[in-house]
Amino acid sequence: MTSIASGPTSTGDARYPSRFRASGVKARHLRAHVLVVAWLGLALLAVAAQDSLSVSRWLAVHMFLLGAVTTAILIWSEHFAVALLHARVPDERWGTARLATANIAVAGLLIGVWSATPVLTAVFAVLLVAAATAHLVMLVRLGRGALGGRLKPIVSYYRAATAALIAGSLLGWLLSNGGAGPDRYAGLRLAHLHVTLFGWIGLPVLGALFMLWPTVLGVRMKERTTKVSRWVLALTGSGLLVAVTALALGWRWPAVAGLALYVEGVALAVNLFVRTVRGHRPVSAAAVWMLAAATCWLLVAVAADLALLASRSLTDAQSGIDTLMPVLLIGFVAQILIGALTYLLPVVLAGGPQDRAAVRAVLERGWLPRLVVLNTGILLAALPLPGPATTTGVLLAALAGAAFLGLALAVLARSGRSPEKGTSHNPALWGTTAGIALTVLAVLVANSGGDPGTGTSASGTSHAATGDVRTVAVTLAHMRISPARVEVAPGTALRLKVTNDDAQRHDLKVENGPATPMLGKGDTRVLDLGTVTDDREAWCTLPGHRAAGMSMDIVVKDGTTDSPDGHSGHTTTATDGDLDLGADFSPGWQARDAELAPAPGGRLHKLELHAGHTTVEVAPGVRQQMWTFGGTAPGPTLRGRVGDVFEITLVNDDKEMGHGIDFHAGSLAPDRPMRTLQPGERLVYRFRAERAGAWLYHCSTAPMLQHMGNGMHGAVVIDPPGLPKVDREYLLVSSELYLGTPGSTAQVTKMRQGDPDAWTFNGVANQYAKQPLKAKAGERARFWVVAAGPTDGIAFHIVGTVFDTVYKEGTHLLKPGDAGGAQVLDLAPAQGGFVETTFPEAGHYAFVDHDMRHAEAGAHGMVEVTD
């Protein structure tokens, strides 16, 4: 028989160290475990209510991790540090204060984030950092002058983990207040997830297992355990530091390298644990199997995480890593907590061998069925199965967790009885009562926004339309709500048909009104706001999403008219801030035809181009005066073959300013053909196309930044000799969109700063998302792309395809039959080329500028492929 203080060096059960037998210390352990059980109860309730509470899943995860798991780690890391270092037990009052501060901070953070109160969130984030810092200081001080033992290096795991908690708290606060911004959100969120799960939780668990695993098995520790523990901490700690730092900075490959080190460290630890197994009867078979299963799930999760980061962008990796959450939260964290408590609660709470055996017998009741149910649930939740299977898996895991929770409550109640004082002062009963009270409070707070998804108001009263009824389709995607602004006339009865079109889950909460439940991809709910008489805001309640831009304004405005489909039937003249890419285009609007016609016959191509001003719809519902060639922006497309002659007659119909033209496809002195024509003048621009390629033409009059930025550009396509026919050919000219009066100080300032309002394909933001391009499965398509700028290039990509042909700036970079493939056609301003691909099956293939700032601000569209 050995004590935890001396480490498990012989077969048998572990005794509670004598210096922990003081009633005050043991009572604090009891109170701490009551808190753990209370947080577990709250988390399980939130899981059970996930279809009715708008933020229940987030609440459940953070109640579990920040509440139950953090409390358990704080109490047990102190306990084990004292035992392993042979140090003096810290002052009970300070330990109680640290634990209380941490739990108060967690409760405050949950309330602050849920209520979107930045000041409250900041205050309690600082409080949690303070509690963690105090815990770290305590762990460092324990090592000063302590005798130390064989497993002294394990305490370094707890110190590194506490540093990870501090970093995770700061990152979480940054995400919750929107400091990440939409561009950095993915990297910072992944950094937060990794430092919390693999740092604050993973490191202390790995460290404790070096001691706990042989103790639970009842075998001698391997001689090289101390050395291996140092190696594992060096690999996991350094790897995690590199990975989290790289993720926060948005650097994917350094993050992959760091995570690979972490995986190597976990694998090294698992190898030692496997070699420790002997044929002896374990002290607790239930604890052994749960600890083993949890460690296996950790190894599976970190390996899968590594594969996802290595194969996807940070933005795309989020959804894949989110699917690993059941494995990490339930398979690893919850199961390691249940397994550890199954062994440790009898050690802490029992008074002697017989009492310890009795407590353990209670906790091990039905352990094998619980183990099977829990891990079956994890498997169902983790595999890419239909929604009902995932839900069933989560419920099975919750059922197994609830079963252990009931047993733990019974044990705590049994250990908390005081014959001298009776049950009225029973701390377990008080803790359970407090847990129930907190549960009721959480339900009341979560439901305070009304009945989500039922079409009721905040007061729960159904609104009957007293005037005009308007239904607006609202889409949640890409950290944005579309439309971002809805204008209604006073007295309008408003309904929002809310659809989540994103891989991430979102909801929509209306200020002083109803809210949807959390919506998965493709889910839709209708919110009935009743008669709208004043302005309101609506937002996604997930932490950080509102601050990152997921909000919309509902504005009551006199004179607003509604079209039959419920959307505003007017268009507006563009001014700063009017752009709403999720709105509808005006009635009768048609997207510009992107199909590229074959080169016409003959060797001479004549065209008359008129330069002037034209008002066009440049974004949904937004009309802008553009400077144009031929009445369109971009201007008409010219196509021919090598050796063809183009004779372009330019007529300046603009009565206010001069214009000229520059064809990049021609080679001639620019003095006369590219001169500026004054209003009413004309010239003939004649050039021979000596070279193949996708060429830009644009206004040659200074300041060219303004002329090109206001639409005076177009494309010339000269076919390479022997260009094979394909089933579909499209032309996409990418450019920036600057709203406002052309030539105004405000617009020119945006141009000079490179701060456009949107990015476009063929002159109109979001047009091919509203009216997709068409193709059929198995067809070969060629996409010609010209980057008109005037300042930004493009990284053209089609989601779901691989390019087998890349032609850029007059030469093939990739041809059919080559072993390689391509994912983007990257073009600097004024460059052009084409890519080819074959659509493998029916579906919707998004095409984007893979600079995500551009894609999310208009430079995206869709190819609708049918059988």
Image (spheres, helix red, strand yellow):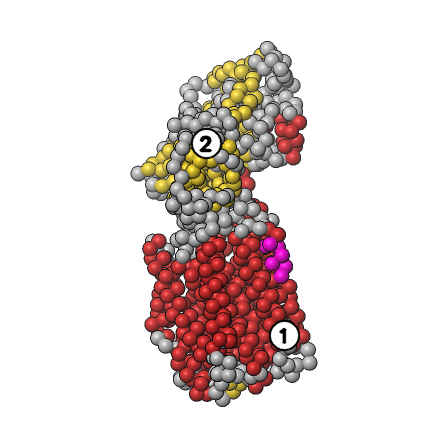
Q: Position of residue 594 (x, y in %)?
A: 44, 29
What residue is disc 1 on? Answer: 93
From the image, which quarter does the C terminus lie in?
top left
Query: For numbered disc 1, what is the local secondary structure?
Result: helix
Residue 575 in the magenta stretch? The answer is no
Q: Position of residue 52 (x, y in %)?
A: 40, 52
Residue extending farthest bottom = 1
Mark 2 or 1: the one toward you: 2
- Packing grade of label 2 (10 A; few <14, some 14-19, many >=20) is some
| Residue plotted at (43% across, 43% down) | 457
Q: Quadrant of residue 728?
A: top left
Q: CA distance from mark 2 to mark 1?
A: 60 Å
**Dot 2 and dot 1 residues touching (CB under 8 Å):** no
User: Compared to 53, does 798 lie above or below?
Assistant: above
| Residue plotted at (53% across, 72% down) | 32
Q: Quadrant of residue 41?
A: bottom left
What residue is disc 2 on? Answer: 491
Q: From where the camera sits, is residue 590 visible?
A: no
Task: Decide which of tag 2 and tag 1 comes sooner along the chain.
Answer: 1
**Which residue type carries mark 2?**
Gly
| Residue plotted at (60% across, 58% down) | 124
| Residue plotted at (46% across, 32% down) | 491
- Packing grade of label 1 (10 A; few <14, some 14-19, many >=20) is few
**Which residue type carries mark 1?**
Arg
Look at the magenta stretch and give its main secondary structure: helix
Q: Nearer the viewer, residue 148 or 470?
A: 470
Magenta extent: 120-127
User: Compared to 289, does 385 lie above or below?
Assistant: above
Q: Nearer the viewer, residue 527 or 722?
A: 527
| Mark drawn on residue 851 | none
